[in-house]
Amino acid sequence: MKGPRPVVLSGPSGAGKSTLLKKLLRDYDNVFGFSVSHTTRQPRPGEVNGKDYHFVTREEMQKEVDAGEFVEHAEFSGNIYGTSKAAIQAVQAQNQICILDIDLQGVRNIKKTDLNPIYISVQVPSIEILEKRLRERQTETEESLQKRLQAAATDMELSKEAGLFDMIIINDDLEEAYTKLKNVLAEEIEKVQESKKT
Ligand SMILES: Nc1ncnc2c1ncn2[C@@H]1O[C@H](COP(=O)(O)OP(=O)(O)OP(=O)(O)O)[C@@H](O)[C@H]1O
Ligand SMILES: Nc1nc2c(ncn2[C@@H]2O[C@H](COP(=O)(O)O)[C@@H](O)[C@H]2O)c(=O)[nH]1
């Protein structure tokens, strides 16, 4: 049986993708599953290996990429990030909506596959607000923050491309953004909930 359509959440680092997806995972029991990416970046305090990311060395990652284990991978802000085939299969095996949190390069690479997700871009009202959020999150060094702001400016411009995303959500007020996200996913959520009743 064909499973539910996956969901791609993209947008600048600090736009609120993780915040929104954590709300979905919390509010909808057994409906969504997170595609746990691999990354070569260092874990942040509180991040759990295998839950937030699979934290790996560059050598380990390259070996797995070369072995064809990834659906997509990209270099972002000095580190490699990638979605393994296994990460998606683990969620789809549970008949859950698979959520991918990936950058714009990842979006373009996923478009070359037959995954057929719903593409959502989470954006911010301005680069100044993004900088404030990233600084307040206290996860980045000044160097990393500057790299992310540069990448964000490019993302904000390129994400306007017609047809690239099914929806662009400006995450200004969090609850309003979350309502928009739930609305665009309503049909898929209902399908999964119905299928789990039987
Ligand atoms: N609407 C909002 N208003 C104010 N702060 C917000 C809002 N949404 C998220 N935040 C805060 O902004 C920060 C960045 O959010 P979050 O970590 O979810 O971004 P992200 O897009 O997942 O970033 P990354 O791609 O780096 O993982 C967090 O500290 C979060 O609490
Ligand atoms: N192309 C991919 N991008 C990914 C993946 N996992 C995360 N990301 C993106 O990386 C940046 C930075 O994330 P952070 O956790 O270091 O703040 C962010 O834009 C994510 O969307 C992936 O598997 N592939």
Image (cartoon, helix red, strand yellow):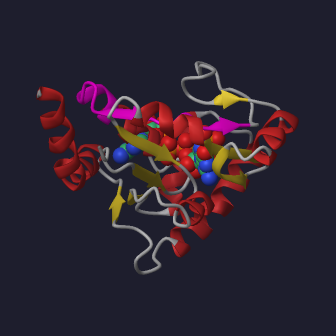
44 or 5, which is in the foreground? 5
Position of residue 62 in the picture relative to residue 71 (left or right): right
Percent coordinates x, y for residue 198 in the rendering: 11, 28
Position of residue 167 in the picture relative to residue 114 (left or right): left
Position of residue 9 in the picture relative to residue 1 (left or right): right
Which residue sits furthest right?
Answer: 59
Percent coordinates x, y for residue 13 in the rendering: 56, 50
The N terminus - image quarter: top left
Answer whether residue 31 is magenta in the image: yes
Which residue sits furthest bottom?
Answer: 162
Residue at (22, 48) in percent of width and height:
188
Instruction: Classify residue 147 by image quadrant.
Output: bottom right
Position of residue 11 in the picture relative to residue 92 (left or right): right
Q: Is residue 118 above or below residue 55?
A: below
Residue at (55, 35) in percent of width and height:
87
Q: Is residue 3 above or below residue 105?
A: above
What is the span of residues highlighted in magenta in the rendered image?
A: 24-39
Instruction: Classify residue 24 by image quadrant.
Output: top left
Percent coordinates x, y for residue 161 in the rendering: 47, 79
Answer whether residue 2 is magenta in the image: no
- The mark total stands at 0
Residue 134 in sight from this viewpoint: no
168 or 68, which is in the foreground? 68
92 or 187, which is in the foreground? 92
